[in-house]
Amino acid sequence: MVTSGTESLSRRFAGLDEWSTLDVLKALHEGQLAAVAAVGFALPALAAAAEAAAALLSRGDGRLIYAGAGTSARVAVQDGVELPPTFDWPQARMGFAIAGSDKAMWCSIEGAEDSEEEARSRIRELQVNGTDVVIALAASGTTPYTIAALAEARGRGALTIGIANNAGAPLLAASEHKILVETGEEVIGGSTRLKAGTAQKVVLNLFSTAVMVRLGRVYKGMMVDFRVTNAKLRRRSETVVARIAGCDQARARQALVEAEGEVKVAALVALGMTREEAKAQLRRHGGHLPLVLRDFRTENPPHSPDPA
């Protein structure tokens, strides 16, 4: 049975609208801190989900697909659209099932979250299959659209991850990986854009970043798969290449030109590979730079000084 934590009214905040603005803000701030703290209890389940997702996505061209309605859908889209510029995650390997379609990102679509058939139709339209990872979010965990989307995806063989803020939620029961973040009653009753929404954003930040780390898109705490789209990122890419290759900025800049802006390729070019050799080695090792560097250093040990 679903507990109604996210829909409950808090006696503590019953007089909120009569408080001073500063006291209102203190209450809201306290709620945000509690939301972040609640995520800590979900970390083991989240780690298992991230590892399973990374393992599946590393084997082919599977996609990350987000499903949700209302605030949850908007939070999901925010996470997903950041992955291409941050980690160069291909746009073709991402999808969204949003109750009410894209229009719901800007305005509320009446009744959309209740349409199970729309959800199933969208999953079929996306041609979800066993290579895909589907992440479904609902604060209450009872949203018909989101549950139906996840159930349809699981029936088609996808790896399914459910994120909800109420224990006993049907969404969690329908998921292979269950991420429960109990944020409880909101400062403003039922306004799950507050504590629940913050917790969902934190969970997705952690999940997608952990997946990208496991997929080799981070090296020694640095982004090594990002798109150079402005001057700031150009400078960052030069710094990253220089650090990895142990070269100066001028050499890093030239390597990036030769590598057509690909940071990992440029680092290997700066070490002496051709662009083609670097790309071939990265393909061989599934894009994992440490493995390429290990082989390179084994085959090209530093020269010892000549004996006196």
Image (cartoon, rainbow, N blue to C red):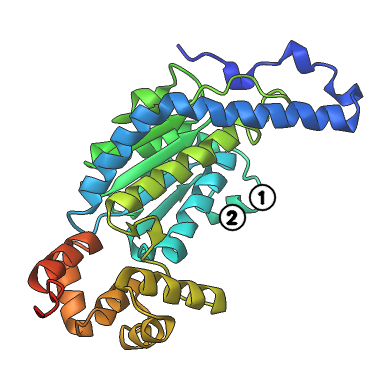
**From the viewer's perspective, is 106 left or right of 27?**
left
Image-quadrant location for residue 290: bottom left
What kind of element bears circle 2?
helix
The residue singled out by tag 2 in the image is 103
Which part of the image, by quadrant, shows the C terminus? bottom left
Residue at x-position 38% and y-position 66%: 88
Q: Nearer the viewer, residue 255 or 82?
A: 255
Left or right of residue 56: residue 99: right
Q: Nearer the viewer, residue 133 or 300?
A: 300
Name the quarter where the N terminus is drawn: top left
Q: Position of residue 110 (x, y in %)?
A: 63, 41
Please say if 222 is above or below 75: below
Which residue type carries mark 1?
Answer: Cys
In this rendering, the answer to whether 136 lies above or below 169 is below
Query: Circle 1 sits in a helix, a strand or a loop, which is it?
Result: loop
What kind of residue is marked 2?
Answer: Lys
Above or below 201: residue 82: below
Residue 124 visible in image: no
Crowd rating for badge 2 (residues with CA inside 10 Å; few <14, some 14–19, many 20+)? few
Q: Cβ–Cβ below 8 Å for labels 1 and 2?
A: yes
The residue that disc 1 covers is 107
What residue appears at the point 70 percent right and 16 percent down from the top-left corner?
9
Could you tell me which residue is drawn at 76 percent across and 26 percent down? Answer: 27
